[in-house]
Amino acid sequence: MADAWAERTLANLPVDDSPDSRRVVELLQSLLNRTTSPQETAESLASLYDPHIKSGRTNTAALWSIYCTAISDIEHDESSFNLLIQTLLSLARLPDVVDNNGQPVKENGNVFWRELPEFPFWLSQGPASPVSPRDMRNNPQKLTRSMRAAKFGALYLREIDRQPIEHTPRGPHDGMRDVGLNTIVDALRWEVESESDVEQARLAVPQAATWIVTAGRSMFQAAKEGFSIGPDCTLDIEMWNLWKRRFGALAGFESADAELRRVAEEAVDEMARIEQEG
């Protein structure tokens, strides 16, 4: 599957794209084929980009957009997702990239590579972005990609929270909380009361439930801390309880299909277990 992804991705690269983009595809192909380790992949990616970053060319859009297609365009099991996660963890542990004055190089306030500048942004704006009914008419594969992005993001956040505190940089940690929070808020913006609500829920609730079932403890910890992504959106215990009520309402909504009700009920059960454990 990695070979087919690499072939498609290489074929779709712009003719004038840099050789670096082709090399990123090849490195991720080798990683997913288990030819190279996450540590080796991280070091190779860094060596590819470090000269550009040191010279002030800090745009990593090509790197992260390719990385996101590796997340969303391949049918992964947890072990192959883990290869991509361990590569990001290894990349974040590499020495900071420093400029000619010995100062760490940053992009939007985040240090290379410690805080993986812009990766959460590209995930949130790419495969983890909301899916609309129009998307389903024009690009039905977007829902599959969205589900994979939710699973990856939740697994990644869970793994970050398992790391020693010195290996938990703010950038990716807060970034993944942000992606999870936005996914769940988007799915549970209102209670399901009509068929049109059910249609929209089918496109968003499974991803939200994935975040809860996979990384619910991480999200509950964020709620206890009052994690905020701006003045108008704070994840606190009140919001957590609202999510549980809305998952519960959907689980009991008889006009919803059985699978949608099942995933909502699974999320409610997991939230109750997490609360019990504290």
Image (cartoon, grey):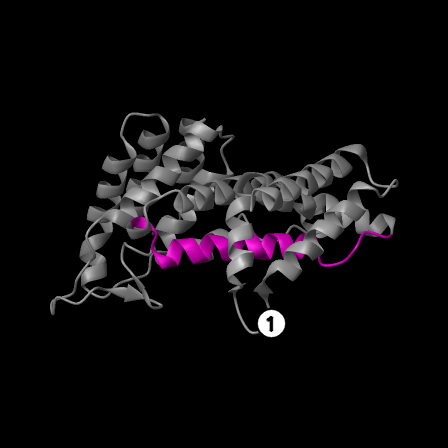
Where disc 1 sits, the SS reads loop
Q: Position of residue 171 (x, y in %)?
A: 38, 58
Q: Position of residue 22 (x, y in %)?
A: 31, 42
Please give the range of residues in magenta: 167-193
Q: Give the number of callouts.
A: 1
Mark 1 residue type: Asp
Q: Residues within 10 Å of mark 1 (few under 14, many from 20)?
A: few
**Rendered-image quadrant of the N terminus:** top left
Q: Is residue 78 positioned above or below 226 on the image?
A: above
Residue position marked by numbered label 1 in the rendering: 232
In the image, residue 140 lies in the stretch drawn in magenta: no
Q: Is residue 255 visible?
A: yes
Between 72 and 18, the residue placed more toward the observer is: 72
Residue 272 shown left or right of residue 96 in the figure:
right
Residue 111 shown left or right of residue 157 in the figure:
left
Q: Residue at x 47, y 52 (%)?
A: 176
Q: Position of residue 163 (x, y in %)?
A: 35, 44
Between 46 and 221, the residue placed more toward the observer is: 221
Q: Residue at x 53, y 63 (%)?
A: 226
In the picture, residue 271 is in which quadrant? top right
Residue 245 shown left or right of residue 114 in the figure:
right
Identify the main secondary structure in magenta. Answer: helix
